Image (cartoon, rainbow, N blue to C red):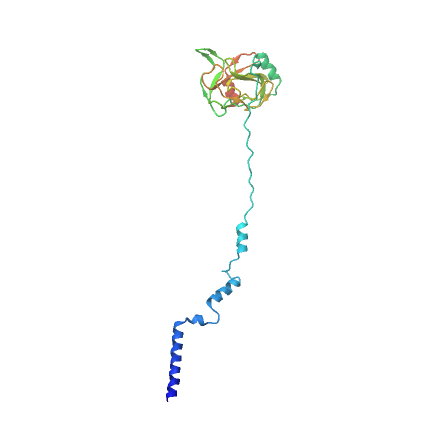
Amino acid sequence: MRFQGTILGGVAMTFVFGVAVATSVPAASLATTSSFDAVQSDVLAGSAQSFDSEAAGAGAVARDGYVVNTPTPTPTPVPKPVASSSEGGYGGAQCQAGADAVAESTAFSWVYPGGYRQSDGFGPRAEGFHKGVDMVNDEGVPVHAIADGIVIAASGNGGTGGVYLSLAHKVGGVAVCSMYMHFLDGSLMAGVGDTVTAGQVIGLTGRTGNATTEHTHFELYGADGVRYDPMPFMTQHAG
C-alpha cells in the first residue's frame, strides 16, 4: 500500500506539472514551424514583402534624360571711336553725294522706337529759328537710324551740336539726310563712310554741346541743304 501510494503521488505530480506547462506556454511555441519561420520563409522566397537593395538603388538612379541649353549672351554694342573733330560735311552737296552712293530705303524707324517726350518743335522760338525737333529721353537711351543710309558727317564733342552724326538716305529716288545732335560723349557707333540700316543703334542719348537736358536734336534736309519739319515725313514713313 505504501508503494502504491508513492506511485499514485508521482502520477499526480506529473499531471499537475503537465497542466502547469500547458497553461503557461503558448500553443504556437510548441509547433514544429514557428510563425517567425513562416514569415522568414516568405521573405526568402521573394514574396511581396521582400526588399532588394540593388533593385531599389537602380530605380532611384534611373530618370529621363535632359539637355541644358545655355543661351549665348547678346553682346552689348561697343561705341566706335570717331575723330575728336568734325569729319565729313552735312551740307546739300554732301547729302546728294551720299544719297547717290546708297540703295533705295524701303524700311523706316523712329529715332526712339520706344517713345520720347518732345520739347521744342520745328520753327521760331525765343533763341531763334529752330531747325529741328528736340526729342527728350534719359541719358544712355539708344538713338536709332531712321532708314538705311551712309554716314556723311560725324564729330567728337565740341560746338553747339556737341557729338553729332548725319546720314544720307535715298527715298523715292530723292536725297534725304537726317541729322542727330547731342549724343553722349564717346557713344557714337558709326563713322564717316559706314553704312547703316533702319533701326540700327548709332549712339546714345546725351547732352553734349548747347543742351540743358538729355535729348536728341533731330533734323531732316535735302540736296539743297535746307532744313524742314521732320515730323510729317516721319509720320508718313515710320507710322
Q: Residue furthest right?
A: 101
Q: Closest to the observer: 56 or 122?
A: 56
Residue sitting farthest toward the bottom = 1
Of all residues shown, which one is farthest toward the front? 2
Q: Residue 112: where, in percent of width, then height?
A: 50, 23
Residue at 52%, 54% in the rendered image: 56
Residue 26, quarter of picture: bottom left
Q: Who's the residue at 38% across and 80% down the image?
A: 13
Which corner quadrant of the image does residue 85 belong to?
top right
The image shows residue 124, relative to residue 43, as above or below, that is: above
> Residue 163: horizontal and vertical position, in percent?
52, 17
Tell me if I can see residue 179 in this picture.
no
**Count of all numbered marks drawn on residues in the image:** 0
Which of 48 and 99 lies nearest the eye of the viewer?
48
Q: Is residue 13 in view? A: yes
Give the side of residue 188 with respect to residue 127, left or right.
right
* Spot occupied by residue 188 in the image (x, y as percentages of width and height): 54, 20
**Above/below status of 86 relative to 63:** above
Quarter of the figure with the N terminus:
bottom left
Q: Position of residue 145 (x, y in %)?
A: 54, 21
Vertical comparison of 77 with 18: above or below = above
